[in-house]
Amino acid sequence: MTLLLLMARRHRLPILCWVALLIALSGPTLPAYRSTYATVADRRIAVALAQHDAATTLMYGRLPDPGTPALMFAWEIGAIVTVLAAVAAVLLATMLTRAAEDNGTLELVRACGVPPHFPVRDALVLLAAVASVLTAGCTAAAVVSGAHVEGADLTGALSFGAVIGITFLLFGVLTVGLAQVAATAGQTRLLGFLAVGAAFAVRAMADTRDLAWLNGFTPLGLRATTQPFGADRWIPPVVALTVTAALAVAAAATAAHREYGAGILPRRDTSTRRLPVRTVAALSARLTRTSLIAWTAAVTAISGLFCAMGAGAVTQPDLGGFLGAQVGAGDRVAGYLSYCGTVTGIIVSVFGILAMLTAGHDERTGLTALVLTTGRRRWAPLGAQAAVTAAGGAIVLLAAAALSAVIAPVVIDGPDVTVRTLGYLLGQWPAVVALIGITTLLLGLRPSWAGLAWLPLTAGALFALLGDLFDIPGAVQRLGVFRHVPDVAAADGVPLGLIALLAVGAATCLLGLLAARRRDLVAG
Amino acid sequence: MTTGPVIEVRGLVKRFGALAAVDGVDLLVREGEVHGFLGPNGAGKSTTIRVLLGLYRANAGLVRVLGLDPASHAAEVTRQISYVPGEVFLWPTLTGQEVLDALAGLRGARDVAAEQRLTEAFALDTRKRIRTYSKGNRQKVVLVASFAAPTRLLILDEPTSGLDPLMEEVFQQCVREAAAAGRTVLLSSHLLEEVEDVCSAVTIIKDGRLVESGRLADMRHLAASTITAHLPDEARAAIDVRLRSWGLAGNAPAERRLVLNVPRDRVAAVLGVLAEAGAADITCTPARLEDLFLRHYQVAAR
């Protein structure tokens, strides 16, 4: 087996999940844009408004003329999928490079006679293969689903697929380069996400400040410069591929000039700090602290950004497409703030599940055994992780809600904006708790099942964000966890949905702890 | 305080699906005893230890540790136990000192002076983060935490696999001190020579089954050595006669190079005979435990 095949075999699950998600988002959403507007005239009005709306421009960029359904799809869904492709690229590239060095698996491979330059080379080849599959998959999805959609043609589908694939590859190769510089895998991921954030900021500045040329200098501007289903320019993808190739050569050259397991940046490896913990929860809190700070900063910034973009979404009379589906036909302020809360809730839930999955990792590696043999109860490590994660989720939501509650009243006109912002964001905590409870139950039953916790989150996010676009029945949508927060300004009666979520969270958590007590520890 | 044995296991069975990892093992460890728990890799030692710690539940058999059933009283039992796992994985972002703080804090009992003394004895730099430690240094952190903890029973699962010979000496000294202080030690290993210097009793298992158990002094017959030598042709017949008179038999008489296994109490006599006969290139190697298993206990492989 070659190193390339070994890498693909070892990481096949996250690779397949990301590819499936990105292709699924690229295809089935396209026909929805055909049926959003009753008449061509309605659509033209919506396009004109969208082209002059600061909020949608900041979020998705400029909507090109003539604003066909296919163009709207590439503008709106294209913006979301390219950002997700960038995030996927950072995570997968880190997994293939520095994470394998940090956990020692690459050391074993290198000791089997694999030349020193092979790991970086094969990581780049695998990323290129994934990018090719993404390109082909997204193209095929757009071709199949765009058969009867105005403006959707083969060339547009090809350029759309190429934009997704090349965006993925560019960020992947950039992250491989960052992996040669960063001190650890964690630092690589952080630098990668900072690069994605910077690329988004440059793209937003290019689109909102009429500096279109700036889009040529950010990977997330590739969609705007290529313009799938519109101009279908091929020079920008070729330039992006050339830059990617140069980055790949630079990454390989840097890899040859560093020590195994160390980046160019130095790392702080000594400390005289003490750890005066007396409970498992205190230890869990200390171990979660760094990631909690990072998540709090990131979620607060994203949540604040979404609120800052709210003015246009609230005032625009005919808002269609993805954002229109989010805001709904009722009270625009409530609709938009609910959307902000949903997005924030989804991100905090990702934090919650990731934090809970560390309990499974700790059990497999023997850390749980080490804690238990200090005289702790069998359920204590899992229970402590659930409690700390729930508290961490509350902290992230509180910080995000506090900043958003300051920003929202400044940019959004309407009654009770501050209270509603706080309500919609903090109201997502029961959803986070429910998902933490479900993850605890799965971990308690069998740690290898814990990955299934992503299913209710993915389903909830799909129902909440794309439910209307996909015409998913309301009864099914209500099974998701994210759309149960009432408008606190208009709420009358008991928020049964939130109480039900808290009950699900508490019950599943309790069942998980009971299940953990009744089974053997998973050996490392 | 318990009045009976510190560890009492009778007829322990632990299955994982169709595989019986432990199949009817008995283990008796008395108060203050250093007990070797021997067996080749995959014999079922770690599985048995996890049952003793309440991490695994037995399918059958009686298990008592410090007078309690670890399946139902795991926390009460492990509060009085120091445990060193075979594979030590620690929180990579914490320093060695922070791990010592955490383990002592969770236990709720700490001997700071002992911890400092052991840290120095094991030459451990506790300011470094775990991710920079070698396997041996990670093992030292857990050894320091275990020996320093004020516990009655130490369960050490192949604790020296990452230590250099100098640190192995320090480890053996720590075991002796623990025994002198009245603590009981269960020392798991696959090397007889590692345990025989410090243990007063041993239990040997293979393929999940008990092979032999008892005081080490009563089991010296297990500790055979392999002697090789080149013999002068004229001396071979006479030497074979002497060896047979002691119940020993070497390889084929036609070969000039003699190879034979000799019980420990006969080694000096055999070497004397060989030297007297003018044998050359004489070597004497203590037998590996694996050889002993193969020679004495042909337990059917499953």
Image (tube, rainbow, N blue to C red):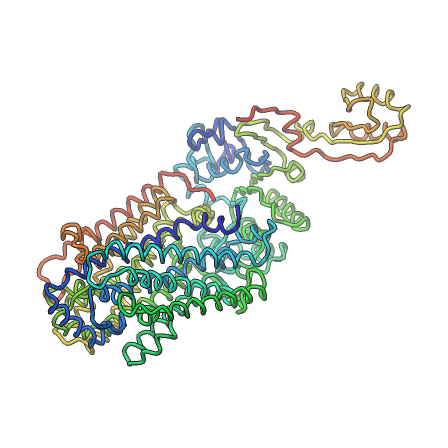
State the residue at coordinates (54%, 29%).
Answer: B207
State the residue at coordinates (41%, 62%).
Answer: A169
Q: Is residue A100 left or right of residue A13?
A: right
* Vertical relation: A445 (above or below) B204: below
In this view, the residue in front, A479 or A324, is A324
Q: Quadrant of residue B202?
A: top right
**Residue A208 in the image, given as x and y percentages of width and height:** 27, 78
Q: Quadrant of residue A518?
A: top left
**Residue B60 in the image, given as x and y percentages of width and height:** 43, 28
* Vertical relation: B190 (above or below) A152: above
Q: Is residue B187 left or right of residue B102?
A: right
Q: How many marks?
A: 0
In this view, the residue in front, B93 or A383, is B93
Can residue B77 be seen here? The reply is yes
**Residue A52 in the image, given as x and y percentages of width and height:** 20, 77
* Vertical relation: A45 (above or below) B243: below
**Residue A334 in the image, given as x and y percentages of width and height:** 14, 67
Q: Is residue B123 left or right of residue A444?
A: right
Can residue B84 be seen here? The reply is no
In this view, the residue in front, A68 or B275, is A68
State the residue at coordinates (64%, 45%).
Answer: B172
Q: Is residue A23 left or right of residue A522?
A: left
In this view, the residue in front, A128 or A374, is A128
